[in-house]
Image (cartoon, grey):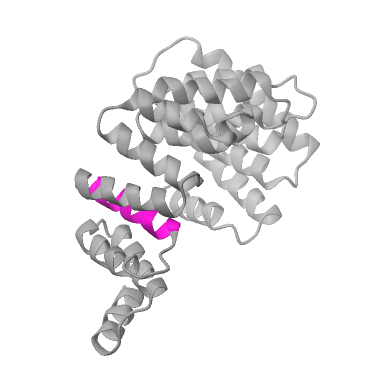
Amino acid sequence: GEAKQLLLDTAQRFPLTTNENVLLAQLYINERDYEKAEESLVAATGTTQVQPEHLALLVRVRVQLDKMSEAAETVEKLKLISPVNWLTVTEEARLLAKRGKKSEAVTKLMELPQAKDPVSSARSVAPLLEEFGCTAEAEREFRRAFVESKAPNRHTYLAGFLLRQGKPLAALELAISCLGMIDLPAGITARIMTGAVHSRKPGDADPAWQPAIAKVETFIKAQVAKDPRNPDVRYAEAELADAQGRYDDAIKAYEAALSVGPGQPVYVNNLCFLLAVH
């Protein structure tokens, strides 16, 4: 892109600064050009005042390149600069997981202070466990937040995980089980529900879907009546109609969502697509 070309042109005339090298590396990462990203990060971390976050990024790039010995050397440098830093522990765990030592990676992450509180763990530690392929341990932490926390959105972490794991019916049933909560965030819950319906595989004939979808319809109708100016609820109404093939209803609902949440690109894009195709 233009930003990358500008940095490359600058590099022809002057040495790039640390921040410019890191920016260039991030642009290469976006393009999945990890070799070039590594070159830029080596330049960025070759200074006397190296930043831990730059070394952590270099570890991730070297793991992507499967340069495990170089990644290990970078982790050791990171440990020297900042031995108890969040970044240091997570990158050390990343390296362990990549080397097949997942139990050791889990132990490292669960020793972090963030792992003590269930919601904090669901926000920070569990996503790393999931990313590192420690799926059972990640689910345990997401479930811990759901069971132990009193936060209104405690179900969203586990529901999101179930959706990412290709279990939309389980995510939908979880959201339905929360409908009696007094402080339930209606908009987020409606979006989880319709996201689950959208994620249903075409050949999935599980009989549990029909009553679950009926409950979603009832919930969304009630929320629209209760708070018609909630853009998340109106968007969920549109997404549900779209998933069910009720395209005229979906178009009307997207238009309603735009009337209460103007300027939101996702509503505009979805509406334009429906108008173009149907």
Magenta segment includes 62: yes
37 left or right, relative to 20: left
In this rendering, does residue 244 appear at all? no
Q: Nearer the viewer, residue 97 or 104?
A: 104
Residue found farthest to the top: 207
51 lies above or below 248: below
- The answer, for residue 46, to whether it is visible in the render is yes
- Look at the image and say whether residue 238 sits in the magenta stretch: no
Q: Is residue 84 left or right of residue 180?
A: left
> Which residue is more in the foreground, 196 or 150?
150
Residue at (72%, 31%) from the top-left corner? 152
Q: Is 222 on the left or on the right of 87, as rendered?
A: right
Q: Which residues are magenta?
A: 52-66
Q: Main secondary structure of the magenta part?
A: helix
Q: Position of residue 169 (x, y in %)?
A: 48, 19
Q: Residue at x 64, y 49 (%)?
A: 257
Q: Nearer the viewer, residue 192 or 35?
A: 35
Residue placed most toward the observer, 4 or 65: 65
Residue 10: name its quadrant.
Answer: bottom left
Give coordinates of residue 190: x percent, y percent.
63, 33
Residue 186 in picture, x, y percent from top left: 70, 34
The answer to whether residue 266 is above or below residue 227 is: below
- Asked where in the image residue 148 lies, by quadrant, the reply is top right
Name, please, the residue furthest toward the front.
80
